[in-house]
Amino acid sequence: MATTTYSVTGMTCSHCANAVTTEVSALPGVTAVEVDVPAGAVTVTSDTPLDESAVRAAVDEAGYELAGVR
C-alpha cells in the first residue's frame, strides 16, 4: 500500500474535487482518493507507488494542474 499527497492548483469547489477524484480513481491500482479543496491537496492511496506522470495526466484531464508532491 502506498499513500502520496500531491499539490493541485485551480480547484475551488466540490465539482473540482469530484472531477479530480473521478480521473485519479480510474488509474490502475488506486484504492482511495481524498481531495482537500481549501488546501489544494489530493491524497492518493494505491496498491503500489504510482508514476507521478500518470497522476499528472489524470489531474490534467480533470482540468487542473499537479504542482508536485507534498
Image (tube, rainbow, N blue to C red):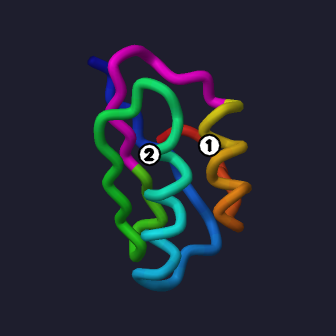
Residue 24's tag is none
**In terms of image quadrants, where is residue 62?**
bottom right
- Magenta-colored stretch includes residue 44: yes
- The amino acid sitting under disc 2 is Ser
Residue at figure coordinates x 41%, y 42% from the top left: 5
The quadrant the N terminus occupies is: top left
Residue at figure coordinates x 41%, y 25% from the top left: 29
Residue 68's tag is 1
How many circles with numbers are drawn on the protein? 2
- Magenta-colored stretch includes residue 38: no
Please say if 10 is above or below 35: below
Q: Secondary structure at mark 2?
A: helix
Look at discs 2 and 1 and give the one toward the viewer.
Answer: 2
The percent position of residue 67, horizontal first and vertical second, equals 66, 51
- The amino acid sitting under disc 1 is Gly
Residue at figure coordinates x 37%, y 46% from the top left: 43
Label 2 packing within 10 angstroms: few (<14), some (14-19), many (20+): many
**Residue closer to the observer: 25 or 40:** 25
Residue 25's tag is 2
Residue at figure coordinates x 40%, y 81% from the top left: 14
**In terms of image quadrants, where is residue 47?**
top left
Please say if 41 is above or below 36: above
Q: Earlier in the sequence, mark 2 or mark 1?
A: 2
The percent position of residue 44, horizontal first and vertical second, equals 38, 40
Q: Secondary structure at mark 1?
A: strand
Label 1 packing within 10 angstroms: few (<14), some (14-19), many (20+): few
Q: Are circles 2 and 1 on residues that touch, CB within 8 Å?
A: no
**In terms of image quadrants, where is residue 3?**
top left
- Residue at mark 2 to residue at mark 1: CA–CA distance: 18 Å
Left or right of 41 in this view: 56: right
Left or right of 51 in this view: 20: left
Question: What's the magenta region?
Answer: 43-52
